[in-house]
Image (cartoon, rainbow, N blue to C red):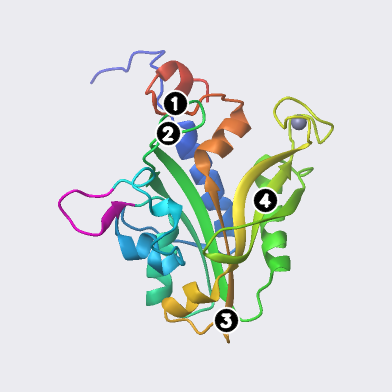
Amino acid sequence: MTTPKSGLSQGHLHPLTQVIGDVVRIFHELGFEVAEGNEIEKEYYNFDALNVPKDHPARDMQDTFWLKDIKETVLRTHTSPVQVHYMEKNKPPFRIVVPGKVFRHEATDATHEVQFYQIEGLVVSEDVSLAHLKGVLELFFKKLFGEKTSIRFRPSFFPFVEPGIEIDVSCFKCAGTGCSLCKKTGFIEVMGAGMVHPNVLNGAGIDSRKYQGFAFGGGVDRLVMLKYGIDDVRLLYSGDLRLVNQF
Ligand SMILES: [Zn+2]
C-alpha cells in the first residue's frame, strides 16, 4: 500500500462550470427542468422556427458559422433551438432551463468570443404574463447576486418575443450609487427576455390562443465576469490555471 503524498493540489471546477451549476440549481428549486440539444442545428430550428425571417441581419454570413458540406446547417448561434424541439415534443404546461455552448462568427476582443455559453429559460402555460417573468427573474438574481439585488425592465426587440425586454440588475458593486462597473448608472444589463411570439408557439404546434409563454436568456460568460470581476472573456477560455485556481 502506498501512502499518498501530503500537500497534493486538488482539482476544482472552472468558474463557468460553477456558475452554470448555480444557475441550474436555482431554477431547479423553482421547478424548472433542464433541457439540452445539439450544437449543430438545421437553419430552420436556429432561425425560421424562431420567427427570424430570411432577410434578417442575424442570418448574415458574418454572424453565423454555416457547415460547408451539409446544406442549411449551422453551428447554433443561440440555445433557443432547444426550446423549439422541446415544444414540438411536449405538451404545456412546462418550465425548462437550457444551458449550452453557442457560436458566433465574430472578431474576438475583451467582450466577444467565437464560442461562449448561454443559459435560457422557457415557461409555457395558460395565463402566464410578464408579471410572472419579473417575479421569477427577481428571485433568480437575488439568489445569484445577493438578497439586495433588484431588477428593471427596458423595452427592446427580439424577433422571437412580443413584447421584448432587456433586463438590468442593480449593480452589486456599488449597490446602485454608480461606479465604473455599472458605468455610473447603478444598473447592469444581463439578459434579454419577453413573451414568446405567437408565431413561435404556433409553429411548434402549441395553440397560442390557449397558451402563453415567457422566455429569457443571456450569456453565462458575462454573468461569470460580473460575479468575479473578470474584465476579459478570453481569459475564461485560455486554459490558464492561474485564472482557474483563483476560484
Ligand atoms: Zn455600480
Residue placed furthest toward the right: 177
Q: Is mark 3 within 8 Å of ligand 1?
A: no
Tell me where the magenta segment starts and ends, as one range: 66-75
Q: Amino acid at mark 3?
A: Tyr
For this view, does 216 lie left or right of residue 91? right
- Amino acid tagged 4: Ile
Give the label on residue 23, or none: none
Residues under numbered marks 1 and 4 in contact, where contact means CB atoms less than 8 Å apart: no
N-term-proximal mark, 4 vs 2: 2
Asked if residue 201 is positioned above or below residue 158 in the image, the reply reads: below
> Is the residue marked by circle 2 packed among few (<14), some (14-19), or many (20+) residues within 10 Å?
many
Q: Which residue is mark 3?
A: 211
Instruction: Examine the structure image and report whether residue 104 is included in the region drawn in magenta.
Output: no
Residue 95, quarter of the rendered image: bottom right
Mark closest to the chain's N terminus, 2 or 1: 2
Q: Which residue is mark 4?
A: 167
Counting from the top left corner in percent of width and height, residue 173 is at 74, 30
* The quarter of the displayed image where residue 155 is located: bottom right
What's the distance in space between the residues labelled 1 and 4, CA to CA? 24 Å
Disc number placed over residue 234 in the picture, else none: 1
Q: CA distance from mark 3 to mark 1?
A: 41 Å
**Secondary structure at numbered mark 4:** strand
**Residue ID at (38%, 58%):** 36
